[in-house]
Image: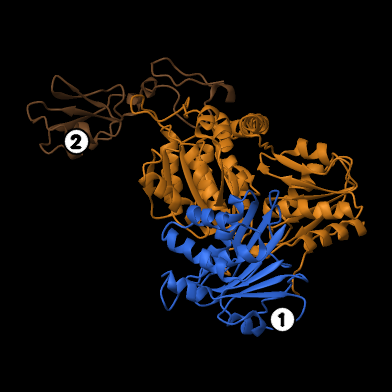
Chain colours: A brown, B orange, C blue
Amino acid sequence: MVIKFQNNDKPVRITGAKDMPPMPAALGSMRQNKTGSWRNVRPVIDYDKCIKCFICWKFCPEPAIKIVDELPVIDYDYCKGCLMCAEECPKDAIGFEKEGK
Amino acid sequence: MKKTMMGNYAASWGAQLARVQVIAAYPITPQTLIVEKLSDIVADGELDAKFIKVESEHSAMAACIGASATGARAYTATSAQGLALMHEMLHWAALARLPIVMTNVNRAMAPGWSIWADQNDSLSQRDTGWMQIYASSAQEILDSTLIGYKVSEKVLLPTLISFDAFFLSHTMEVVDMPEIELIDKYLPPYKPEYKMDVNDPRSFGALTDEQYYYEFRYKMQKAMDEAVDVIKEDGKEYEKITGRAYSLIHPYRCEDADMILVTSGTIAETTNVAVDELRAEGKKVGNLRIRVIRPYPKKEILEVVKGVKKLAVIDRNISPGYSGIFSQELKSALYNEVDIPVRSYIAGLGGRDVKIEDIKDMANDTLKNDAPNDLIWKGVKI
Amino acid sequence: MIEIRMHGRGGQGAVKASFVLAEAAFQGGKYVQAFPRFGVERRGAPVEAFTRIDDKPVQIRSQIYYPDGIIVLDPTLIEVVDVTKGLKKGGWILINSDKDPEFYDFGDDYKVYTVDATEIAVQNRLGSRTAPIVNTAIVGALAKITGIVTIDAVFKGIDSSIPRFQEENKSAAKQAYDSIASG
């Protein structure tokens, strides 16, 4: 039986070998796994300082920075708060706030 | 069409007929001629394939893994130390369930530095999850490559085809080359259900915790079980188009035998001749060639040996500290099933020639002696 | 089944001779097997090669211990190698030599033939003057002596197994074939 790869937001339920493909491969979409709750600090972009170099977009390991209307936008549903964007920003345009948990 | 060729070239032509798309290999005696010929074939435009030159066997297998993961039909060939260097990647290819076919020219592990026939190189890779075939003629090398891809692509397990250094690799003999039109029908292009695809990105072989890893192993075992029947079916289908039959075991004059010699590789062919001579002397002896050791054809072997009084295994390999590996495998297959004494012989390590007389000696020794002996080193100079 | 062992020195073409002979027999409709004595061949060192010819596929995978015939590509090997070892009674020995067969004494059990394959190879510019390649001339002589293969089959064998200087090789084979008085 062929276990189909999925590319939608439906959760994949695995109860045993019969639900698994032959090889270890991601079956569904990682979009289901919203990792934003893992965050301790929240990066915030100061758009007055931003020069649209998109280095933050390039370096985000998640990736949780999207390009919307030619600006970098952080997707807080998935951002884990690693602050790599802030570290790499050449204009110090990304600061952070404590996450109000 | 019949042609003469060395065993090594039979592997090259097999890969060409299989229309492999990616070849990544590193040269090592006695395998060198295989990939040398394939690089010629690719350079001459006779095969539409990418030939990747790599800096080691580890990289060769890594390149094949990458190619196969994207859905390409991948091929490589190696020998002895080269196969050992691949070891890590062999596990990877099997657990990633990639239908790679590899030729291994059985060569003794060093030191002493040796380029001669010995099965310890490939049998050391027994537990990596590769199907393992031991060919005993140049014809079988070519045919096994084609059947190998067909089986591998069905059960999603890689195939290792091994054959004896020089006794096959550098021996010229007559090989019937099947027509490419027939092979194209037998072995259509590889269309994988699962593959790496830039249009559908996802991770392969990533962290797999204890909730899932165990089940992947279970699935691999199920695929091996399934492979037993697939090898038989695809062997029969191959017979329909070429007239040449292949299965997991090849019994010769075993039907009414009192004693069966269990052999593999080129020793098995010479054993057929020895069996004919022993039969002419009135001794009811048969030869059971084990062609496929993984998946292990336990049921099929039991079917052949169940009525026999004695068994003798000739191993061109040794698991130091215990015994020959084909012998261990046979004994474990018999346990709890039938009670037949097994004598275990070691012969021909490091390319030592195994003559018809040697095989007859071992057969006569088994016929004469009742007690199963632990291990007999045929022809060892003490 | 006919089993032939060749003795030569690395670089003389003994292995190729075993292949050309097998190819010629194959062209004549036989099943064949040809292989070197598995060693690390070095120029000038003694080498051996083997050819088996049969009407059915050859299953024996060991070296040849009891040959029907022996080919000696370099007569100086006779002093250093036991070339007749295991040779069957009534077997033949073909030596590349400018001497007559009577020059060599192997007793009454064997029949000795000679052919000056070195001179024939030089005349046909095969190899160099210092290292002529004598294999095709020897196979030509063998065709005459044994009748295992016809000279036409030898030509076909040269065509399909030797990539270059085919005409020169065929000429050498024919010259050697003709130089043997009778089979």
Q: Assign a secondary structure to mark 1.
A: loop
Q: Amino acid at mark 2?
A: Ala
Closest to the observer: B325 or B230? B230
Q: Assign a secondary structure to mark 2.
A: helix
Q: Amino acid at mark 1?
A: Phe
- Residue B125 showing in the rendered view: no
CA separation, marks 2 and 1? 94 Å
Task: Give how far across and how far down residue B49 sits, in percent.
Answer: 39, 40
Residue corresponding to mark 2: A86
Q: How many numbered marks have been drawn onto this rendered protein structure?
A: 2
**Residue pictured at 69% horizontal, 52% vertical:** C58
The image shows residue A81, relative to residue B141, as above or below, that is: above
Task: Give how far across and how far down residue C20 sits, in percent.
Answer: 55, 59
Closest to the observer: C47 or B94? C47
**Residue pictured at 41% horizontal, 70% vertical:** C125
Closest to the observer: B290 or B357? B357
The image shows residue B130, relative to residue C172, as above or below, that is: above
**Horizontal relation, residue B195 to residue C91: left or right:** left
Task: Give how far across and how far down residue C14 sits, in percent.
Answer: 55, 68
User: Disc 2 vs disc 1: which is toward the camera?
Assistant: 1
Residue corresponding to mark 1: C106
The chain that hosts pointer 1 is C
Extreme residue in the top direction: A10
- Residue C96 showing in the rendered view: yes
Are the residues flagged by discs 2 and 1 in contact, CB closer than 8 Å? no
